[in-house]
Image: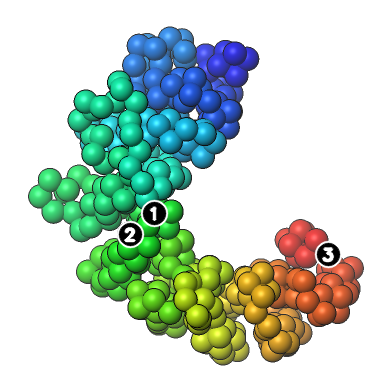
Amino acid sequence: VAIRGKLSASNAVVRESAMIGLGLMGTPESAADLVAVLQDTQRGRELLATQSISSSTRAYAAHALGLAAVRVDEPQERQRIALALVEVLEHGAFGRDDVTVAAVGSLGLIVLGPRVVVPARDLRSHAHLDHVVSGRALANYLATWVSRPRGALDGRTRSVRSHACVAYARVGATSSEDVRLAAVDRLVELSGDRGQHVHVRTSAAIALGEVARAGAAQPDREARRRLLALAKSGQPLERRFARIAVASVCARPGAGDEPMQGWREVRQVLTAELGRSRSSDLAWTALAIGMLEDSAHAAGVETGPSATAALTMMAVRRRSDDDSAALGLGLALAARGTDRAQTVGERLVSELDETTTPVMRGHLS
C-alpha cells in the first residue's frame, strides 16, 4: 500500500521508483497495477492521479513488469504479464519506441518453459493468447520482430529489433533444445548479414552470447565461429561485443561427451588477439579472457597459467587507465579460485597502492 501510494507523487523520480518497487514485489496485485499504468487505463490514471500517462512512465511500467514476471510463482501470472506486453507490441495506440523497447525487453525475462501453460479462464478468449501459450510460442513471436521488416513489419524500428534479438535469445534459452538451436541459427544468420544496420548485427552477436553454448552441436559451433570472425574483423562495435559474447557462450556447457568443446579454441584465439589488439579493443579482450578463464574454473576445466601470464605481461606495459583497469579485472577473474590467486592479488594490491587515479582505484578495489 505504501509503495502504491507513491505512484501519485508529483516527483517523476519517486513515481518511477515506486513502479520498480511494485515490480520487485512480484505479486499478482502489483503486476495488475503496473498493467493498468502501462495500458493508460482509467485505473492507471487514478493510481497516478493524472488525466493521461506519459510514454516514459508507461515505459517504466513495462520494465517493472519484466521484474514482476521473474518473481511471480504461477506460470499463469507470467502468461498474463506476457499478454499485456504483447498488446503493447501489437497495437499502434501504444506506439512510442520507448514503450515498445521496454515491452520487448521485458518479454525476454519471462520464462514460460517448454510445456503449454493452461491460461486462466478470463484470458482464454484473448486475441493474442497464441503468442504466449508456451516458451516455444513466445520465442516464435519474438522471432517475427527479429526478422527484417517488410510489409506490415515496416514500423518495427531498428531499436526495437535490436532489443528483440536479446529477448528472443533469452526466451529461446529457457525453452526446449530445438527452440534454442533454431534461435542460434537465426541469430548467426542475422549477425553476418551485411545488409543489416551495424546496431542490429551487434545486437544479434550479443544475443548469441545469451543462447549459444560451448558444446559440439552444429549451430553452437557456427555461433562461436561467427563471433570469433566478428571479434577479428568486424566494425569496432561488433569486435568488442563479440569478444564478450563468445566468452559468455563458453561459460555454458553443451550436451554430450564434449560439453566444453569450444572453450580451448576460443581461448587460443582470444589470447593471441590480446597481443595484437588495437588499443581501442585491448580492454574488451582482457575482460573476455578473464570471463573465459573464470567460466572454465566453474565448469571444472583445468586452465593452466598461460592466460594469466599473458594478461600479466600486458599489464606490465603501462597503458591507459582504462586498459590497465580492464587488465586488472581480467587478471582477477582469470586467477579466481586457482593457486595463482594469491600472486595476482598481491600484484593488484601493489598497483592499488601506487595509483592515484580514481578510475583505476575503483576498478582495482
Crowd rating for badge 1 (residues with CA inside 10 Å; few <14, some 14–19, many 20+): many
Percent position (x, y) of residue 5?
A: 57, 13
Q: By what rule are the colours in the image chosen? A: rainbow
Mark 1 vs mark 3: give the one in front: 1
Q: Which residue is mark 2?
A: 179
Contact flag, marks 1 and 2 (Cβ < 8 Å): yes
Q: Please indicate whether residue 43 sits to the left or right of residue 161 in the image.
A: right
Q: Earlier in the sequence, mark 3 or mark 2?
A: 2
- In this view, the residue in front, 203 or 358, is 203
Q: Secondary structure at mark 1?
A: loop
- Marks 1 and 3, how far apart in space? 49 Å
Crowd rating for badge 3 (residues with CA inside 10 Å; few <14, some 14–19, many 20+): few
Specify the label residue 175 is tagged with: 1
The type of residue carrying mark 2 is Val
Q: Please indicate whether residue 283 sits to the left or right of residue 133 in the image.
A: right
| Residue sticking out furthest to the left | 151
The type of residue carrying mark 1 is Ser
Specify the label residue 219 is tagged with: none
Residue, x 63% and y 72% (percent of image)? 299
